[in-house]
Structure formats: C-alpha cells, structure tokens
Amino acid sequence: MAREPAAKNGRRQDREQQILAAARKLFRERSFDGTNISDIAAKAGTATGTVYLYAEDKTHLLHQVLAAFVEDLTQELEEGLTHLHDPLERVRYVVGKHLETLLAEPELCALFVREVHMGGRSGSRLMQSLKQRYSSVLTKVLDEAMSAGAIRADIPLGVARSVVFGGLEQLTLKTWTGRAPVDLRSGTEGLMRVLLPHSAANEPAAPQTIDVALKRLEAIADRMERSLPDDKKKRAEETDE
C-alpha cells in the first residue's frame, strides 16, 4: 500500500518537471510576455487546467523556473570552486561562468534582473534571497583575492563586485541580440584586467579609477548597440527596463 502514494508522488514530480521544462524553453524562445499558460500546457503535453495545479499563474511559474535556474548555477559555481585553490583563478572562474551564463541564457538572465528589481510581486523575496546567495559567491572569492593581494585592494569590496556584475551586463544584456557578440575569453580577461593590480596588468603606474574603467566598458557597449538594427535596439532597450 505504501508503494502507491510513492508512485503517485513520483508521477506528480515528473509532471511538474515537464511543465517547468516547457515553461523554461518557451520563456527562452518566445519571451515571458510572448508565452501564455496554454502554450506551456501544450508544450508539456498536458491540459491547461493541470498547469494551475502546480502554479498560481504565469508569474508564479516564472519564479519557479528562475529559482531552479539560479539554484543550479549557484551549485555549479560552488562545486567548481572546490577544485580551485589559487585566489586569482577562483575569481577568473566565477567571472567567466557569469559571462558564459549571460551569453547562453540571455532571456532568463534578463527576466531574473527584472523580477529582482520589481517590488510588490509574488515571490520577490525569493528572488532577492536567490540573488544574495549567488552574489555572495563572487563576494567571497573577491574578498579572498584582495586579502591575498591577487587583485587590487584599493577599492571597496562592494565596488569590485559591482564592476564585475555591472561591467559584464553592460557588455552583454544590451547587445545579446546584436551582430557583435561578446567573446567569452576576451570578455573575461577584460574584466580581470580591471581588477588586477596595475603592475600585474602591465598598466601605467598612475592609478586608474573605477569610474574610468566603467566608462570604457560602457563606451564599448554603446558602440555595439549602435551597430544593431532598429528592431533589435528596441528589444535591447526593453531588456534594460
């Protein structure tokens, strides 16, 4: 008798995963606004009413998708770091993985940013907690590298973190629909050069401010954005919003 409830729970979990997989695929392909519950149900091979057994509405479903997405990414980062011991390589790994994710999952990343910065929505606290856990991975490796002298320690830790997140987003979220894709290796190394001590980065001895570095990153992003067709520029602007 005990096997029947277990089997039923197993089928329910399988159905839930099918619905979440369908939602994730459609959000990526059609965008959140371009997808409705009936589309997700059809993709999952189930009835529209069945979807509502697992999610209150489309936004709730989105939060489930994003939660799984960020949870998997955070676990991957944490597991990858267990094999790296050099402070600089640990920073490079996290920076590279973040950029890789922005390039591979632009729709989900844009949706996550939108949900994190919108208040008063169901699940917003969950999104904030996921953001904090994910960003704490970068904060930790930056702090370790600063303490070890592997990266510049003349800037606040929070500023260094903002340089990484803000710089990579400037180079990718504005231009992911464009004709000038960001190269993973050069993008990663470009951000690393901003973080390195001047002597290690072969920079002039005169200190370079973070504001100057960010302006350079923004100028690159703006040049890329100007190269987009008008319809793609509109999509990039909507992503920023």
Image: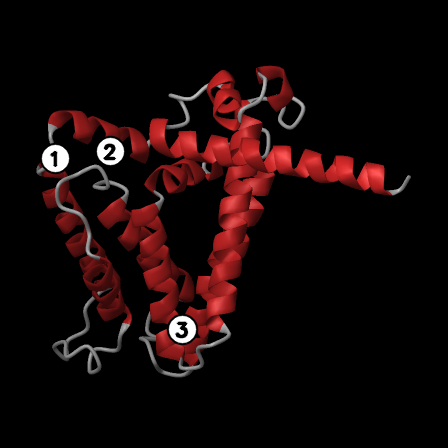
* Label 1 with label 2: CB-CB less than 8 Å: yes
- Judging from the image, what secondary structure is the residue with disc 3 in? helix
Give the residue at mark 2. Answer: 236
Badge number at residue 228 = 1
Q: Residue at image x 41%, y 70%?
A: 142
Q: Amino acid at mark 2?
A: Ala
With respect to residue 189, does 177 lie above or below?
A: above
Q: Residue at image x 24%, y 41%?
A: 176
Q: How many marks?
A: 3
Q: Amino acid at mark 1?
A: Leu
- Judging from the image, what secondary structure is the residue with disc 1 in? loop
Give the residue at mark 3. Answer: 90
**Gap in angstroms between the C-alphas marked 1 and 3:** 34 Å
Residue 174 image offset from top left, x and y in percent: 24, 40
Residue 112 image offset from top left, x and y in percent: 44, 39
Q: Residue at image x 69%, y 34%?
A: 12
Q: Can you see residue 57?
A: yes
With respect to residue 65, does 152 lie above or below?
A: below
Q: Is residue 197 left or right of residue 180?
A: right
Say how the picture is coloured: secondary structure
* Label 2 or label 3, whichever comes before in sequence order: 3
